[in-house]
Every structure is written in structure tokens, then in C-alpha cells.
Image (cartoon, rainbow, N blue to C red):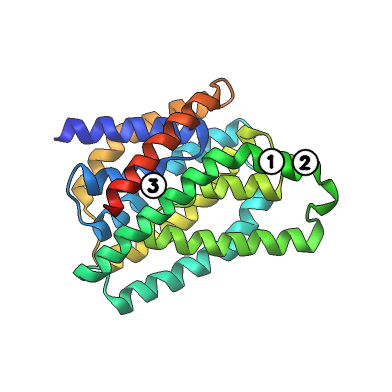
Amino acid sequence: MSLTYILSGFAVGLLVGMTGVGGGSLMTPLLTLLFGVTPSVAVGTDLAFASLTKSAGTITHRKRGNVQWHIVGRLCMGALPAALLATLALQYLGPLNAAIGQVIRYSIAVSVLLTVVAILFRTRMLAWVHARPGRQLQGRSLAAATIAAGAVLGTLVTVSSIGAGAIGATLLVMLYPKLSPAEVAGTDIAYAVPLTAIAAFGHWWLGSINWMLLVTLLVGSVPGITLGSWAAKAVPEGFLRGLLAMTLAGVALKLIY
């Protein structure tokens, strides 16, 4: 079982490093469906997993000049307070309660489906934005929209551990269409580090992290995300994104039914 966890961590880390998406979207359903981990513990453990693996990815992307720090700051202004509020809401409702666990399971499924939509229609969304340059936000409007996007992502990530990848990357593409794919991946991973760290701390406070499972996943994921980050500019994303979308669609249906 430990080897299975290590290989799972490596595969997810590799995909996150190359595309900036797929971490929570794959790891949380993987823990829930294949390994029988309860939804709340799967979310908490994956958040701790993401905060550490994405730290490794951020270091690599920073060295390659792929992180736009002013965008990271704006996203964090919305995401971090939202994560704190969502944690307090979970504490009030009771994250380990069976009924709340089922709600979290469905929230994971919805977040996965949103991720699939983001992956499949990202190119069309980008084409729509480029075709209407006059409608692109600028200045204070752009900053406010980025902060609002961060707040939505902060809530999604804290409740389901999903959203900082494909959904976050798609929002970055819509708001900042001039970013290169590598910059989108690097910026998306960088802002997710403090977000997932705060959300993970909240889940630790709530008692919903499996530390032994976390350590095993990290053994595989840290080299995986480092390798994937170095390969981000060289690997074609089309095939990977199509395969990821089909896999996630199946995962979402399994979670629902």
C-alpha cells in the first residue's frame, strides 16, 4: 500500500508541475474512491500535501522566471481571508460529521466538474478574450476582479481542496491573457502555496489530516512536481489536458453515483 501511495504522489506531482492543474482534482478523489479515506480527511490531507508539493514547484518556477508576483499578491488578498472564514464555517458545522462528509463529497464532485469545464473550454475562452480586447479589464477593475476570484477560489479550496489548479489557471488566462502557459502554471502554483497552507492548518485544527498518509504521498510527489516544473515549457499540453479531462469526468460521476 505504501508503494501505491508513493507512485500516486509521483504521478500527481508530475502532472501538477507540467500543467499547473490536477493536484486536488486527482488526489482528493483518489484518496476517497480508491483508498477509502473519508471525504473530510481526504480534503485535509490533500491540502497539507498540496501546500508542500506546490512549495517545491514554486521554487523551480521562480528560478525559471515563470511567477508574476503582483498577481500572486492580488489573489492572496481574496483567497486567504476566504480560507479562514470557510474553516470557521466547517468548525461550526462539524467537518467530521457523516452528513457534512457527504456534502463535502458532493462539493468535490462539483469542483471536479468545474475543473473539467475549465480544461475543455480554456482555449475557446482565451480566443474569446483575445477577440474582444476592448472588454479586457485594466487597472483597478482588474485588481478588484483578481481579488474577487481569489476569494471564490479560497472558499472552494478549503471546502473541497479543489480549484487552485485548473479553475484558478483558467481565471488567470481570462484576466491576464498575455501570460504565457508557463507563467500561468507558475503563478497559479505560487499563490496556491499560502492558500493551501492556511487551509491545511485549519483542517489540522479540525483534526482532519492523516499525517502518515501525507508523508507517504510526499515521498513520491516532491520529485514528481520538481521534474514536471522543469518540463513545463517542453511538454505539449493538448494530449495531457484531454486525458485529464476524461479522467476527471469519470471521477466526478463516480463521486456522485
Where is residue 102 shown, x and y percent of the image?
26, 64
Check disc 3 and give the amino acid type: Gly
Label 2 – label 3 distance at C-alpha: 29 Å
Q: Which of marks 3 and 1 is nearer the N terminus?
A: 3
Which one is closest to the eye, mark 2 or mark 3?
2
Say the numbered circle drawn on residue 24: 3
Q: Left or right of 90: which side holds 225?
A: right
Pinpoint residue 89: horizontal percent, then vertical percent.
38, 75
Query: Viewer-proximal residue, 254 or 208?
Result: 254
Q: Position of residue 126 (x, y in %)?
A: 69, 41
Contact (Cβ within 8 Å) of mark 2 with mark 3: no
Q: Is mark 2 on a helix, strand or loop?
A: helix
Question: Quick one: label 3, few (<14), some, or many (20+) residues within 10 Å?
Answer: many
Label number found at residue 233: none
Residue drawn 20% across and 56% down?
Answer: 38
- The mark found on residue 126 in the picture is 1
Q: Is there a contact, CB below 8 Å, between mark 1 and mark 2?
A: yes
Residue highlighted by disc 2: 130
Query: Distance of mark 3 from mark 1, alpha carbons?
Result: 24 Å
Side of 126 relative to 151 (left or right): right
Local crowd size for mark 1, using a 10 Å CA cut-off: few (<14), some (14–19), many (≥20): some
Q: Circles 3 and 1: CB distance less than 8 Å?
A: no
As measured in the structure, the alpha-carbon distance from the residue carrying label 1 to the one carrying label 2 is: 6 Å
